[in-house]
Image (cartoon, rainbow, N blue to C red):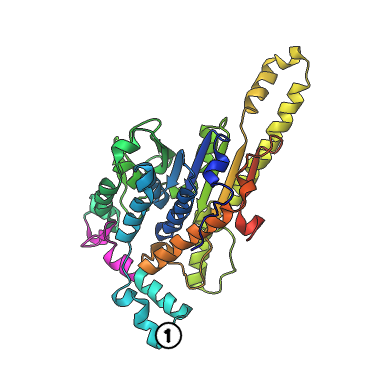
Amino acid sequence: MARPDKSRGTAGERIQGKYDAVAMVLQGGGALGAYQAGCFQALHEADVRIDWLAGISIGAINAALIAGNTFENRVARLRAFWERVTTPNVGLMDPNLFQPFLGTGMAMRGMINQAASIQAAVQGQPGFFTPRMPSALFQPPGSKEARSFYDTGPLRETLLELVDFDLLNSRASRLSVGAVNVRTGNFVFFDNAERDIGPEHIMASGALPPGFPPVKIDGESYWDGGLVSNTPLNYIIETEPTLMSLIFQVDVWSATGEFPNDIAEVIERQKDITFSSRTRLNTDVFAYIQQLRNQVRRLLEKLPKEQRDMTEAQVLAHMTNHASMNIIHLIYRKKSHETHSKDYNFSRASMEEHWAAGYNDTVRTLRHQDWLDPPPPERGVVTHDIHRHGRD
């Protein structure tokens, strides 16, 4: 893997004192979440201190592992989690097993990926979820076992072991995780700035039906936040609009992709579009709104004082009270051997590949040191992405 270039100072030194908040926004995406862990490792090695973590589903789990550990232990705990919930390269998961027949190309990797996905669906993953026996289809209606195909009890034990919830709730880092109220359909965020967070809040954010069961919190049941919005960027923007923010937005689904040729590719493309949450459109629209706010503010400044004191002008002035934001966009790009099962392919080989991709994308991004500078006031919001704005 590439290594960060510290010859001109670290990224952490570059941004020190320039922002009110440095945030990391993490999408949901199952096994693809190892990409986010790789991104964080590169930021960690570049001395970037994350103040605020916002996540959905697997993004919420990664966020909790970061916020719930000391700075020195964060990468190690992420690694411990991902090694626990992935299948080692042994038996059918060993790439060398198929090498005499398929060589080392994409056909072999595709076969391993398919085997890993089938294994996860049939057997579950250690430290994460296990299949219900008998199946939910044969459980009594109304029972908790009838509401999901898997039991996520192992995930609770893993979180309790790898996340220090006392540290997490000390608010050294802010943590916000999104979920959906099953009864009302409302999107909610559990935020440690407002309440104590426990393993049930993290599990609620990742309770994707019908695979995983709803999680009950304070008398209400919750499902995966990705059912409504898989990217928690808007929560940060709307909750603290006056903070000068640097936001590392890490997406594991890409809205753009090739036209599908068969049903398997149709399913994959449908997932990409559904769970990408149209992130690019959202950031572009927000940048446009920020430009409008800046124009209204400049117009108000030209009014005579007696007109600026009018109620209507005061309302407009309040609406323009938004700080500038710098969004660093990191998006996982699928490999040719991946299919519609990429989000539940928990093979160790794929995990390492996703992790390395996140690490390398972040290292390449941080080489553009000017991207770390706050945007000029007249722009309000800027978005940088090595896949769209530059390559090195």
From which residue to which does the magenta span run? 118-139
Q: Is residue 250 above or below residue 347?
A: above
- From the top left corner, tell me how far across and down residue 263 is, in percent: 49, 72
In the displayed structure image, the side of residue 69 where residue 244 appears, left or right? right
| Residue at image location 44% in from the left, 66% down from the top | 353
Q: Nearer the viewer, residue 281 or 191?
A: 191
Given residues 62 and 339, the one toward you in this image is: 62
Amino acid at the residue labelled 1? Leu
Residue found farthest to the bottom: 101
Residue 21 lies, with reference to residue 34, above or below; the image says: above
In the rendered image, which quarter contains the C terminus?
bottom right
Residue at 32% in and 54% down: 212
Residue at x 41% of width, y 42% of height: 177
What residue lies at 24% left-to-right and 52% top-to-bottom? 153
Q: From this viewpoint, which residue is outermost toward the top?
A: 306
Question: Which of the pair 276/198 is nearer the observer?
Answer: 198
Whether the magenta-drawn stretch holds residue 151 is answered as: no
Q: Is residue 61 visible?
A: no
The residue indicated by pointer 1 is: 102
- Apparent side of residue 258 relative to residue 41 in the rendered image (left or right): right
Residue 104, quarter of the rendered image: bottom left
* Left or right: where 61 falls relative to 16: left
Image vertical order of residue 137 relative to residue 246, above or below? below
What secondary structure is found at the residue carrying circle 1?
helix
Q: Position of residue 84 (x, y in %)?
A: 29, 59
